[in-house]
Image (tube, helix red, strand yellow):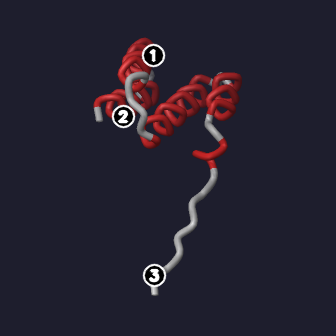
Amino acid sequence: MLAESLAMASIAANMAGDLASSRRLLDEAQVVADGLNGLGTRLLMYQARALNGLLDGDLDAVRSAAADVPSSAARPTTCTPSA
């Protein structure tokens, strides 16, 4: 939960124009996330990297974040209704 909160805070800081805090928060989130294996955490880290890159106008960072997402995570899951 800490990694996710830090990643979201980095996006908010970037949107507020505080780039130094945004980078620091994202770096902290990455340190915490490195020890975790949850899919939600990993996807939120990719999302934060991509959104921060987009807000910074850094399309290379956006491409890098998108390219790092494992194909299994990017595939939508299907639900089968139970009878």
Residue at 45%, 16% (x, y): give it: 23
User: Of discs 2 and 1, which sits in the foreground?
Assistant: 2
- Dot 1 alpha-carbon crowd within 10 angstroms: few under 14, some 14 to 19, many 20 or more: some
The mark nearer the N terminus, 2 or 1, is 2
Secondary element at image label 3: loop
The residue tagged 3 is: 82
User: What residue is pinned by disc 2?
Assistant: 4
- x, y percent for residue 68: 64, 30
Instruction: Residue type at mark 2: give it.
Output: Glu
- Alpha carbons under labels 2 and 1: distance apart: 15 Å
Label drawn at residue 73: none
Q: Residue at x 43, y 42 (%)?
A: 40
What residue sits 58% from the left and 23% below the top? 56
User: Which mark identifies residue 23?
Assistant: 1
- Report x, y in % for residue 36: 38, 29
Secondary structure beneath dot 1 equals helix
Q: Nearer the viewer, mark 3 or mark 1?
A: 3
The mark that comes first in sequence, 3 or 1, is: 1
